[in-house]
Image (cartoon, rainbow, N blue to C red):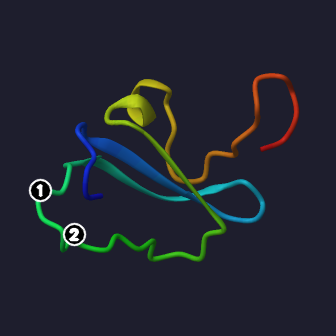
């Protein structure tokens, strides 16, 4: 992602709010022609967090995303 200053974990999430793919520790792109990252599985949402957050939070493929307030994502 051009212009980002920190590495990211990128999580792809399907319509049932299930994590279907994770790219961990994606480095910032230094060029205007950045590579395109695509989930190998169908996804409806993408969540980008600081690198390492997915592992620290125990998020892996198959996890279901739910808001802390109890509302679904």
User: Does residue 5 appear to the left or right of 58 in the view shown?
Assistant: left
Which residue is depicted at the point 21% across and 69% down?
34
Q: In the rendering, which numbered label is found on residue 34? A: 2
Query: Disc 1 on helix, strand or loop?
Result: loop
Q: What residue would you read off at disc 1?
A: 30
* Res. 45 image quadrant: bottom right
Query: Disc 2 on helix, strand or loop?
Result: loop
Does residue 49 sit above or below 3 in this rendering? above
Q: Could you tell me which quadrant the N terminus lies in?
A: bottom left
Q: Position of residue 25 (x, y in %)?
A: 26, 44
Label 1 and label 2: CA atoms lie apart by 8 Å
Depth check: give the residue in front, 67 or 5: 5
Which residue is depicted at the point 33% across and 43% down?
8
Which residue is depicted at the point 84% across and 41% down?
72
Depth check: give the residue in front, 50 or 40: 50
Do residues under tags 1 and 2 come within 8 Å of each other at their CB atoms?
no
Does residue 10 sit above or below 35 in this rendering? above
Which residue is depicted at the point 77% across and 44% down?
73
* Res. 29 image quadrant: bottom left
Q: Position of residue 58 (x, y in %)?
A: 49, 31
Q: Position of residue 43 (x, y in %)?
A: 61, 70
User: Quick one: label 2, few (<14), some, or many (20+) residues within 10 Å?
Assistant: few
Does residue 17 sit above or below 6 in this rendering? below
Q: Position of residue 62 (x, y in %)?
A: 60, 53
User: Does residue 23 appear to the left or right of 16 in the view shown?
Assistant: left
Depth check: give the residue in front, 47 or 55: 47
């Amino acid at each position: 992602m051009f212009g980002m200053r920190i590495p990211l974990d990128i999580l792809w999430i399907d319509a049932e709010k299930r994590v279907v793919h994770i790219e961990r520790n994606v480095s910032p792109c230094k060029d205007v022609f950045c590579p395109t990252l695509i989930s190998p599985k169908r996804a409806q949402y993408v969540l980008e967090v600081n690198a390492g957050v997915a592992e620290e939070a125990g998020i892996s493929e198959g996890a279901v995303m739910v808001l802390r307030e109890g509302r679904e994502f």
